[in-house]
Image: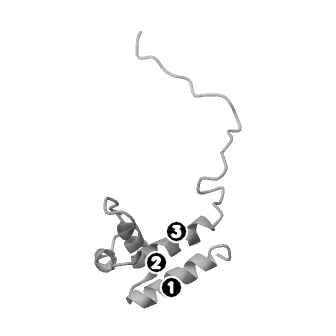
Amino acid sequence: MQQNQVLLNLLDKLAARHVATPAQISLAWMINKRPYIVPIPGSRHLDRIKDNLAAAQIKMSAEEVAQIDQALAAVPISAVFGGTKIERKSSCRPAVRSSIN
């Protein structure tokens, strides 16, 4: 949480500026970044789906998009999200069964 605080503060600031939620700003950032990017958020609740759709109406400046890009570039990637290769404990592979008799 501490490592991401700069990014979270930026999202909060942009959300307040656009009268939106940080989640909406995250979606709007993707939409405003490239016209061919279409985020597909999932939700089980109608209210969240409506919030997600409202993010498409948020027009961000190139400077705002760049601010988020810069903040993301400064966040270290954890081992869980793609940094460290997972090594197997055993090199054994499961046996392949043949259906040929």
- For label 3, the residue is 69
Which mark, by number, is residue 12?
A: 1
Whichever of labels 3 and 1 marks the residue nearer the N terminus, that label is 1
Q: Nearer the viewer, mark 3 or mark 1?
A: 3
Q: Amino acid at mark 1?
A: Asp
Residue 9 point in image, percent of width and height:
57, 83
- For label 2, the residue is 64
Distance, label 3 to label 2, CA atoms, is: 9 Å
Q: Amino acid at mark 3?
A: Asp
Q: Element type at marker 1?
A: helix
Q: Are marks 3 and 1 in contact (CB under 8 Å)?
A: no
The crowd level at tag 3 (other Cα within 10 Å; few <14, some 14-19, many 20+) is some
The crowd level at tag 1 (other Cα within 10 Å; few <14, some 14-19, many 20+) is some
Picture residue at 38% right of the left edge, 78% below the top: 60
Task: State the image quarter where residue 55 is shown.
Answer: bottom left
Q: Is residue 21 left or right of residue 12?
A: left
Residue 31 point in image, percent of width and height:
35, 68
Q: Are marks 3 and 2 in contact (CB under 8 Å)?
A: no
Whichever of labels 1 and 2 marks the residue nearer the N terminus, that label is 1
Residue 7 point in image, percent of width and height:
57, 76
Whichever of labels 3 and 2 marks the residue nearer the N terminus, that label is 2
Q: Is residue 37 left or right of residue 75?
A: left
Q: Specify the color scheme.
A: one colour
Q: Amino acid at mark 2?
A: Glu
Q: Quadrant of the C terminus?
A: top left
Which mark, by number, is residue 90?
A: none
